[in-house]
């Protein structure tokens, strides 16, 4: 069937308007979709693209500044990337890989700044030291051993370590002051960490994309169906303000709709999406805007998650720079809701249940009962309970300086492992159709920080001929080194890291 015949057939549908066949349609206008769109346009300026977003602006859900921790996740301070398991050697792989992936993001942003496609940088990225904080003899031993091992890698070579209470007070006064001198505590610090406003970054990417005549970005548009018609995808969507329905036809679809991606993946009907489930987790922060407190803290301080619980509950005390103003966040405090998006529906979870994923959902619920109990306890916490948790980080904290801030919604993936066992998977995963014409991003942290790396992997998988052919020169121009080179070659790493620091004004 030709594209003309397809358009003619679809046009017969009542009250449906038709546009030309696109090269790509991106569902969702968050950091991941805007990154993919920008990369595709760099490789192929002639790419005809449509972006559909249900909110009134881009980056309004998980990417929004107050919905996201804003950590430039580089493995510098996140102790759950190098888990502490008694009797076992520390595995540094995830921290080193994450570090190289964040460097890849920095290289892409640096390229956009150098090429004049971003006029400013301080509105989306700021230098903020990354620290790891532990207390208790066993945890201190773990942190010291981690420090001694990981600093051999170029990405961690400038890491500092201390158990000295006076130095801790100098590095992070809120953490050190008011603490007993006899308490066993330790910190590692990397001054070259960052705070990133992914909402602002998303909007800068979308603004750049919107400057192309062959890119259209539509807001307040809810995708209602995704259907394959021969070799073309038919995307049906509805305007949330006037109810008008439209269809766009495309050769390639990316579903980057945050928590709602699972529901849309199910609508597509691709076999690769069968049996997948989603476990929604809501979040809350304590937020301080008191200048007298905020000015005493310039750091992101991460600690260990509670024993036996996933990385999503690792506590941290973070400096945030949002719209030029500094605040401090502490948390996250988890919770449970049946919504898949912060502005979603309470029926989202129920809508995602299918015959093929009922058994994995029930199995994961049974085997993660401790986590579910934890979510219930967190959901019923009082303000005093949250302040008590804060006091472990900040001994002199006062309740009057803090208020509750609702974070974004996350949907963790429920899938089968290589042995066929249902598991609750933390992190992100890209699901791709067998013909590479549709891809969907599922999961959560550290997706925003490593979105460039994730999208480059997607592009290499879905467009292999172009990547190895006509796009190869531009690829090397944007990314002078592969991630494996950044992980293993200190000379290359240091050269490109210093270059990005200069361009992004992070020195």
Image (cartoon, rainbow, N blue to C red):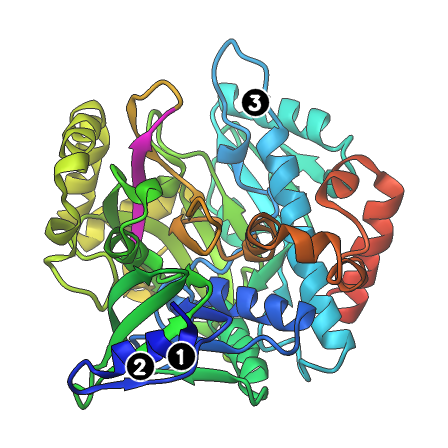
SS of the residue under disc 2: helix
The percent coordinates of residue 69 (x first, y second) are 44, 57
- Mark identifier at residue 4: 1
**The C terminus is located in which quarter?**
bottom right
The residues tagged by marks 1 and 3 sit, at their Cα atoms, a distance apart of 65 Å
> Can you say whether 80 is above or below 300 in the image?
above
Q: Nearer the viewer, mark 1 or mark 3?
A: 1
Main secondary structure along the magenta-highlighted residues? strand
The residue beneath circle 2 is: 8
Q: Residue at x 40, y 37 (%)?
A: 311
Q: Is residue 283 left or right of residue 291?
A: left
Q: Are the residues tagged 1 and 2 within 8 Å (C-beta)?
A: yes
For marks 3 and 2, give the one nearer the viewer. 2
Q: Residues within 10 Å of mark 3 (few under 14, many from 20)?
A: many
Residue 114 seen by the camera: yes
Question: Quick one: label 1, few (<14), some, or many (20+) residues within 10 Å?
Answer: few
Q: Report crowding for label 2: few under 14, some 14 to 19, many 20 or more residues within 10 A (C-alpha).
A: few
- State whether residue 56 is above or below residue 456: below
Look at mark 3 in the image and give the residue it sits on: 142
Are the residues flagged by discs 1 and 3 in contact, CB closer than 8 Å? no
Mark yes or no: residue 407 visible.
Answer: no
């Amino acid at each position: 069937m030709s594209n003309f015949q397809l358009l003619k057939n679809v046009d017969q549908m009542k009250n449906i308007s038709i546009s030309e066949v696109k090269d790509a349609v991106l569902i969702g206008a968050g950091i991941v979709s805007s990154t993919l769109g920008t990369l595709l346009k760099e490789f192929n300026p002639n790419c005809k693209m449509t972006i559909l977003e249900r909110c009134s602006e881009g980056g309004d859900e998980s990417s929004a500044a107050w919905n996201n921790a804003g950590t430039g996740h580089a493995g510098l301070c996140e102790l759950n990337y190098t888990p502490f398991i008694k009797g076992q050697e520390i595995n540094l792989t995830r921290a080193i890989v994450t570090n190289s992936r964040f460097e890849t993001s920095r290289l892409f942003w640096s390229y956009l700044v150098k090429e004049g496609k971003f006029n400013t940088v301080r509105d989306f990225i700021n230098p903020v030291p990354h620290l790891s904080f532990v207390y208790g003899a066993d945890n201190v031993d773990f942190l010291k051993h981690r420090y001694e091992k990981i600093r051999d890698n170029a990405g961690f070579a400038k890491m500092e370590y201390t158990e000295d209470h006076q130095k801790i007070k100098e590095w992070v006064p809120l953490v050190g002051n008011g603490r007993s001198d006899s308490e066993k505590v330790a910190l590692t610090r990397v001054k070259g960490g960052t705070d990133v406003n992914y909402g602002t970054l998303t909007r800068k990417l979308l603004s750049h994309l919107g400057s192309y005549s062959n890119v259209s970005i539509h807001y307040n548009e809810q995708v209602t169906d995704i259907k394959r018609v021969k070799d073309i995808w038919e995307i049906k969507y509805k305007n949330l303000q006037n109810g008008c329905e439209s269809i766009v036809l495309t050769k390639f679809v990316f579903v980057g709709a945050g928590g709602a991606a699972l529901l849309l993946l199910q609508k597509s009907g691709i076999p690769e999406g069968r049996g997948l489930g989603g476990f929604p987790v809501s979040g809350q922060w304590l937020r301080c805007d008191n200048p007298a407190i905020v000015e005493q803290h310039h750091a992101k301080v991460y600690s260990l998650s509670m024993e036996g619980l996933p990385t999503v509950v690792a506590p941290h005390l973070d400096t945030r720079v949002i719209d030029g103003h500094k605040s401090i966040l502490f948390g996250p405090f988890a919770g449970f809701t049946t919504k898949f998006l912060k502005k979603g529906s309470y029926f989202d979870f129920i809508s995602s249940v299918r015959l093929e994923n009922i058994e994995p959902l029930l199995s994961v619920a049974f085997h993660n009962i401790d986590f579910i109990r934890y979510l219930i306890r967190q959901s019923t916490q009082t303000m005093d309970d949250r302040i008590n948790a804060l006091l472990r980080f900040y001994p002199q904290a006062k309740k009057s300086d803090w208020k509750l801030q609702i974070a974004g919604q996350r949907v963790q993936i429920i899938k089968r492992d290589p042995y066929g066992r249902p598991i609750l998977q933390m992190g992100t995963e890209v699901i791709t159709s067998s013909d590479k014409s549709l891809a969907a991003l599922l999961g959560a942290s550290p997706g925003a920080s490593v979105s460039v790396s994730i999208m480059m992997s997607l592009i290499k998988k879905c467009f292999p001929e172009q990547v190895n052919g006509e796009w190869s020169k531009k690829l090397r121009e944007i990314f002078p080194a592969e991630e494996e080179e950044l992980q293993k070659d200190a000379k290359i790493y240091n050269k490109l890291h210093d270059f990005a620091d200069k361009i992004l004004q992070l020195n």
